[in-house]
């Protein structure tokens, strides 16, 4: 078969394998070629045409042959680590380690097929894991392969050639109005009752509430019975990040890579680090707990502070004002240390048990707040601003001022709760008589 310069050639090698060679652009004055071999001539022709198309598209092709595991590791450490926040990277690392590498890690990157990806997706669900997990794994792989295609390491992104797993329908859980009032009533006898009230009365996220600092509570006059300009400024989130080894790895006699500091946990490494993109704004306050900026503008917001939440929070701040508080937090332990997100979740479920209501996640308290704000007649676009979503289906752009409509919305919400509490009290008195 006669081919022009750069088009490659096909022949049988000494082992009887059909072989194709594609000439690549020279690097550092050195000749470079990509070789394909197969027992089937048709297979070589097909792969040759794919390589030619890839060369025409990207201008070059890598001669190094990666496995999926090798490439995903390179993508994670050199690309994903510069684009994603630490919590996201933790999620990626876990899914790569548990799902992608065991299923397809040993396959050569340029030999990966849509069928391989489909089998991986099916295996995740067959193992009893959620379709949401399968979809997330598929998305991570698709992004990693996008960069492999962009850099000429594969001819195509095979993850985009099949449909991503469809997530099963989920019913968002939320407390009813009566259940929310039950929690608020029980919370009055709890040391962190004001925290639970903030979840239900303004839909605060866990991280932004336990990371709220006292100087972000803006109150002009605590004695004013009808304030118009008091606010909570939700500017930071308290999160736990995973420490990594910062020391260089070294090889064991068996060939395994281990941290040179000989410490098992990254948190114990003398040169420990947290991987984060350059634009990630975060401050380590103690141990693995960090204060970080919200990841979206919608998450960085100002919320009107009206009664009853205003009185509840001011009462809590007054009652805890003499306690140690080196990090200036509104909610903290009596000794001044921050409340770990995992501990806060445990305490949330404990308060739901005490109230005898449906068990929902801490984050589902936001769903309750949305439902109750809408029940109080608050327009959906105002709810979006208060809750901190980023689109109308989720929320709107961050508003820097405490708008009159937001204040009116929170007052309407507070009045609905007060009316409902009074109705419950009246009904209780009638039953007692």
Image (spheres, helix red, strand yellow):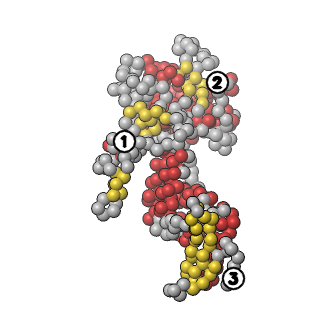
**Residue behind mark 1:** 271
Locate residue 425, reporting x and y percent.
Answer: 51, 27
Left or right side of 222 for 155: right
Locate residue 280, reporting x and y percent.
Answer: 53, 38
Residue 118 visible to the viewer: no
Viewer-side label of 1, 3: 3
Q: Secondary structure at mark 2?
A: loop
**Residue behind mark 2:** 402
The image quadrant where one finds the N terminus is: bottom right
Name the residue rendered at 33%, 47% in the picture: 265
Residue 314's place in the image compared with 146, above or below, is above
The label number, if any, that marks residue 2 in the structure image: 3
- Alpha carbons under labels 1 and 3: distance apart: 59 Å
- Alpha carbons under labels 2 and 3: distance apart: 75 Å
The label number, if any, that marks residue 121 in the structure image: none
Name the residue rendered at 29%, 49% in the picture: 262
């Amino acid at each position: 078969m006669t081919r022009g310069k750069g088009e490659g050639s096909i022949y049988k090698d000494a082992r009887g394998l059909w072989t194709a060679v594609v000439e690549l652009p020279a690097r550092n004055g050195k000749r470079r070629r990509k070789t394909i071999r197969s027992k089937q001539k048709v297979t070589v022709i097909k792969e040759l045409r794919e390589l030619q198309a890839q060369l025409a598209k990207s201008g070059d092709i890598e001669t190094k042959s990666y496995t999926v595991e090798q490439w995903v590791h390179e993508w994670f450490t050199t690309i994903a680590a510069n684009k994603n926040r630490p919590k996201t990277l933790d999620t990626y690392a876990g899914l790569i380690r548990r799902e992608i590498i065991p299923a397809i890690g040993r396959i050569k990157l340029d030999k990966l097929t849509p069928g391989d990806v489909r089998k991986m997706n099916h295996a995740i669900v067959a193992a009893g894991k959620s379709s949401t997990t399968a979809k997330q794994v598929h998305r991570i792989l698709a992004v990693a392969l996008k960069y492999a295609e962009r850099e000429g390491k594969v001819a195509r992104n095979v993850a985009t050639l099949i449909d991503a797993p469809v997530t099963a329908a989920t019913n968002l859980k939320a407390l009813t109005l009566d259940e929310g009032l039950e929690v608020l009533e029980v919370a009055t006898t709890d040391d962190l009752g004001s925290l639970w009230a903030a979840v239900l009365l303004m839909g605060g996220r866990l991280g932004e509430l336990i990371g709220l600092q006292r100087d972000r509570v803006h109150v002009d006059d605590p004695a004013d019975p009808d304030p118009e300009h008091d606010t909570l400024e939700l500017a930071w989130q308290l999160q736990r990040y995973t420490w990594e080894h910062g020391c260089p790895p070294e090889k064991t006699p068996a060939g395994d890579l281990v941290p040179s500091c000989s410490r098992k946990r990254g948190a114990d490494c003398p040169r420990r680090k947290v991987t984060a993109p350059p634009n990630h704004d975060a401050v380590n306050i103690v141990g693995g707990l960090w204060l970080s900026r919200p990841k979206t503008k919608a998450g960085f917001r100002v919320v009107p502070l009206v009664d009853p939440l205003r009185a509840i929070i001011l009462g809590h701040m007054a009652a805890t004002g003499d306690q140690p508080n080196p990090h200036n937090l509104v909610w903290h332990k009596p000794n001044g240390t921050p409340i770990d997100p995992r501990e806060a979740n445990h305490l949330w479920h404990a308060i739901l048990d005490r109230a005898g209501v449906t068990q929902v996640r801490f984050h589902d308290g936001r769903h309750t707040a949305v439902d109750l704000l809408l029940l109080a007649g608050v327009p959906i676009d105002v709810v979006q601003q208060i809750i901190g979503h980023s689109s109308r289906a989720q929320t709107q752009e961050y508003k820097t001022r405490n708008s009159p409509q937001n204040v009116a919305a929170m007052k309407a919400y507070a009045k609905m709760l007060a009316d409902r509490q009074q109705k419950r009290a009246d009904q209780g008195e009638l039953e007692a008589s």
